[in-house]
Image (cartoon, helix red, strand yellow):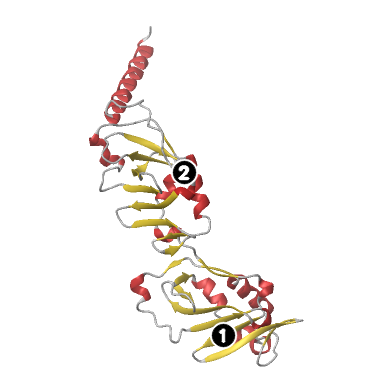
Amino acid sequence: MSDRILRLLIGLLILVIVAWLAARSFSGFGGGAEADDLELATDVQAIDSIVVVGPDETVRLRQGETWTVNGYETIPETGPSITRALEDASLGQMISRNPENHQRMGVTDQQGRLLTIFIRDAEPWSIILGERAGAFDEAFARRIGADEVYVLRGSLVSLANRTVDDWRDREIFSAERAAVQRIEFEYPDESFAIARDSTGWRVASTGAEAELSAVSTMLQQLTSLRAIGFAADSVVETLEWDPPQLRLRVVGLADAELAELLFIENEEIGYFVRRADMPIVYTVSSYTGDQIARREADLAVDLAE
């Protein structure tokens, strides 16, 4: 055997020994043990609530007539998302039983996110989720009071990392474009309306033709108006809505009011927006708000020329 081959074999042997020692240290001599089966309610109707307690905030999902998160209405797909997450959740092999590894895996009581599922007529199920464990849908997990750490796999990992705002419904207003017949604009210094007729859109007071591309862009934003976020409670208390910078009334067939929207522009946020009949204050981007908050001079062809 040549010296070169001998050196290669010795090098490979050293690598194998180092890898084995590292794995042994990391796992606390516990690698290979199988996790207990996850006893989760795959029937979403059996769940009363899901609570995730993290270092920064607590997320409380509660099921009633609809799902809510910390008292707010959630996105429509909340129920199906939770059902899928419970169905595909699984614990892999135990990778450590050494408490000294808990901190670097993020599964200490202080670091981790405590996920508890409260099930009607059954004991709640809890687990501490820590750092990501390789793939996007994998995280280190430890049961309360236990030293063993496993890898939790499935979409439950990403759901447990959502914030309150991630769960909240961001739809402000939605309607078919053809259903909108009239839009009324009320600014502190100007009020006007545009209305649809058989030939298109016109400024209601003068009959001037409305600029087609401007109206089309406005309707595109307005009829599928979604927030980019929500105003913090501390900010909501400081906002003056009487009057708002813009009051926008959307009218449908037979003069039926589809929505009344209030806008306040903000240099940093874009726009604060709320429906007149709801206290929730949304935020929308400057681009979206600017396309909706038009002036008469922006819309009337004969005034713009």
Left or right: where 15 falls relative to 192: left
Q: Secondary structure at mark 1?
A: strand
Q: Nearest the camera: 174 or 299?
A: 174
- Give the spatial CA distance, label 1 vs label 2: 47 Å
User: Which residue type carries mark 1?
Assistant: Phe
**Residue at screen point 36% across, 47% down:** 115
Residue at image coords 48%, 65%: 228
Picture layout, residue 2 above or below residue 292: above
Locate the C terminus and report the quarter of the image it occupies. Answer: bottom right
| Number of numbered discs overlaid on the protein picture | 2
Instruction: Give the residue at mark 2.
Output: 86
| Amino acid type, mark 2 | Leu
Outermost residue, top side:
1
Q: Residue at x 51, y 45 (%)?
A: 84
Which image quarter is the N terminus in?
Answer: top left
The residue beneath circle 1 is 185
Dot 2 crowding, Cα within 10 Å, few <14, some 14–19, many 20+ = many
Q: Secondary structure at mark 2?
A: helix
**Spot occupied by residue 248 in the image (x, y as percentages of width and height):** 55, 81
Residue sitting nearer the eye, 6 or 13: 13
Tell me the quarter of the picture where residue 134 sits: top left
Would you call the spot at circle 1 few (<14 residues within 10 Å), some (14-19), or many (20 or more)?
A: many
Kindly indicate the quadrant of the structure image that contains residue 194: bottom right
Whether label 1 touches label 2, CB < 8 Å: no
Viewer-nearest of labels 1 and 2? 2
Residue farthest to the front, as pictured: 121
Q: Closer to the camera, 123 or 208?
A: 123
Residue 272, given in percent of the width and then of the height, sits at 45, 75
> x, y percentage for residue 193?
62, 86
Q: Earlier in the sequence, mark 1 or mark 2?
A: 2
* Percent x, y of residue 261: 52, 78
274 is higher (above) or lower (below) than 297: above
